[in-house]
Amino acid sequence: MPDPNPILSGRGVGFVASGRRLVTDASLELAGGTTTILIGPNGAGKSTLLKLLTGEIKPAGGEIRIAGELLAAIPAWRLACLRAVMPQHARLAFPFSVYEVASLGVDGIGRALTRQRREAIVAESLAAAGVIDLAGRRYQTLSGGEQQRVQFARVLCQLEAGRSVAERQVLFLDEPIASLDLCHQLALLDMARSIAARGVGVLIVLHDLNLAVTYADHLVVMDQGRIIAQGPPAETLDDALLRQVFKVDLTLSRAPAPGLPFLLPQQHRARPAA
Amino acid sequence: MTLAAPSPTMATTTLTTLIAGRRRTGLLAVVGLTLACLLLTIVAVGQGAISIAPGRVAEILMARLSGDTNLLEGRDVLVVLNIRLPRVLLGLLVGAGLAVSGALMQGLFRNPLADPGLVGVSSGAGLAAAATIVLGDRFLAGTMMKLPFAALPVGAFCGGLITTLALYLIATRGGRTSVATMLLAGVALGAMAGALTGLLSFISDDRQLRDLTFWSLGSLGGASWTKLSVVAPIILPLLLLMPLLARGLNGLMLGEAEAYHLGIPVQRIKALAILLVALAVGASVAAAGMVGFVGIVVPHLIRLSVGPDHRLLLPLSALGGAMLLVGADIVARLIVVPAELPIGIVTATIGAPFFLWLLLRRTSLIDA
């Protein structure tokens, strides 16, 4: 159902880079308290759309508002209180410790907080992301999955520090589970949903369609720079869309309990080669 | 994600210990280096052709500070106050400026190899300074008469700024700074500046040539209170304003986009850092000539001992750089008494092997 007062809204957003239209006429809304998942094949424009919505790049057309304000008019530090972004992968130039990396989330915007409060936020976030035991380790010596969880802890820190300034917040996660094992994939997505339950608008870019369908309140499908479908996952994903967008000839099934669609890649292997 | 955190209470205790340990190390390092720096300053003022005991140096300095003129008599007082003290202070200032400039550039370029000397910024400042020495008499005659000490720092500053900006523009495409491009462009810019400096020495007269040679090897020899009063206002802004940059540089370690997400005014931080580095390097080059490797050796040693957090790295680099240069100056003054070795020779003798060791120790310095 449409939210009369969305936390983030994009209308007719477009972006052009060196003559190529990477995002065309994209409109979407993030409602507080919901998880929106953005799916689409490689090169569909998901990352570009995310960069537009986080303010990292300026749209060539359309307008984006966060909490009613024009995104372009919000200064960087206040924007940092309104939204946190977890990148696909972040490499560090120097040997910072895990604790220091997570602290970056509160060092900037948390300056008004007491030192005790800042340290407590970092400790809670490290614990929530399951990396508190790594706190003294150097970030560079961690595995890809562990690094991803540390970045998640940093983003949690920023969200918590920003909460003292901004009541309504947005969380962007760009392929946050790409390097995680199944246990941590589910744990991170559970966590994202519980953040949404607090009233935050959450936008996640995912590749795993089964997980996307399971965790999304609202599913957004992109292809060739356009949003071609969006809505509740059960009604948005169908066999025609799978064929058209993802170029796979699979038949969706319905999971027994919540009635959500799911797909089995085994079908693909079982089918005789054409 | 509670399932992944086994025993939160125990882990939190460990974390508290960790944070306390970090703070203690930082405090110890700052206090220790400050004391060592003071001590070295007093020793350095006593060293030279006329040797003065550290106790006597301290006595003279205390007397000067308290305005007690009774104690301020004798040849050693003159040597301390008029010759050695400005020289040591200049060494402290230039050393601190060069080391912090190195740390800032490394943070800005996200690479431990970036150093004003290595990427051609010093050469650019040097070229401009050489141009001031050689061409100044002809084109700036009027100004040079009025401001004999200001023309060189201002010239060197402009040279440093232009080179830094050129480097940044060449190496940055679409907001991303390529480190490989930066290093290669730095080599090219350095070579170009070197060639032009060579050309200037070719057309210079004997007096100018002697100035140029002495100055291109680096020396604190010409220090005086006047020189100090010109150089200090140009280097001090870097040392006073560096705390403003520390948080921003920490954020930049994640990447420019991530720093922006954290609310850091990336463009402003970069502009301020570039300006301050150009100022400090320009003034250092003008005052002490080409002194290499301070900017790369010192921050690296500090990172090895207390970690890369710029809130500690920058002030500790300032102290370490000041000590390295004053120490090198002691060596330069004592090793061939009564003559003096150019200080650039001393720092390069220490710095170059250190740099090679750095390369051998770490295999993946250039990719980033």
Image (cartoon, coloured by chain):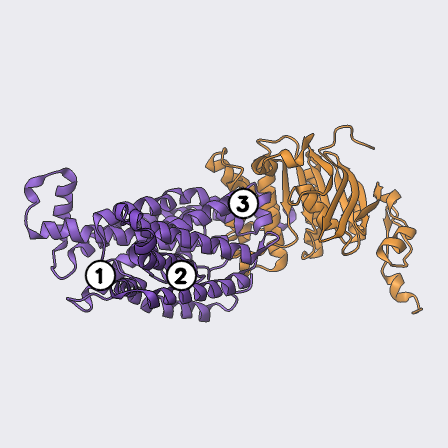
Chain colours: A orange, B purple
Q: Which residue is mark 3?
A: B267
Report the mark closest to the observer, 2 or 1. Answer: 2
Residue A202 visible from this viewpoint: yes
Kind of residue at disc 1: Ile
Q: Which residue is mark 2?
A: B123
Q: Are the residues flagged by discs 2 and 1 from a single subunit? A: yes
Residue B279 position in % (x across, y down): 39, 49
The local crowd at label 3, few if under 14, some if 14 to 19, many if 20 or more residues have their Cα within 10 Å, is: few
- Name which of mark 2 and mark 3 comes first in the sequence: 2
Where, quadrant-wise, is the C terminus of chain B in this rendering?
bottom right
* Rendered location of residue B45, percent (x, y): 18, 54
In this image, B9 relative to A246: left or right? left
In the rendered image, the vertical position of residue B202 relative to residue A222, given as above or below: below
Mark 2 and mark 1: Cα distance apart in space:
25 Å
* Label located before the other in sequence (2 or 1): 2
| Separation (CA) of disc 2 from disc 3 | 26 Å
Is circle 3 on the same chain as circle 1?
yes
* Helix, strand or loop status at disc 3: helix
- The residue shown at (89%, 51%) is A241
Q: Chain of mark 3?
A: B
The residue type indicated by label 3 comes to Gln
Judged left or right of residue B307, residue A265 is right
Which sits in the foreground, A96 or A254?
A96
| Residue at (56, 40) in percent of width and height | B263
Report if the CB atoms under discs 3 and 1 are less than 8 Å apart.
no
**Residue flagged by tag 2: what amino acid is it?**
Ser
- Residue sticking out furthest to the top: A4
Q: Which percent across, then down, holds residue B157? A: 38, 51
Q: Chain of mark 1?
A: B
Q: Which residue is mark 1?
A: B330
Mark closer to the observer (3, 1): 3
Which subunit holds the residue at mark 2?
Answer: B
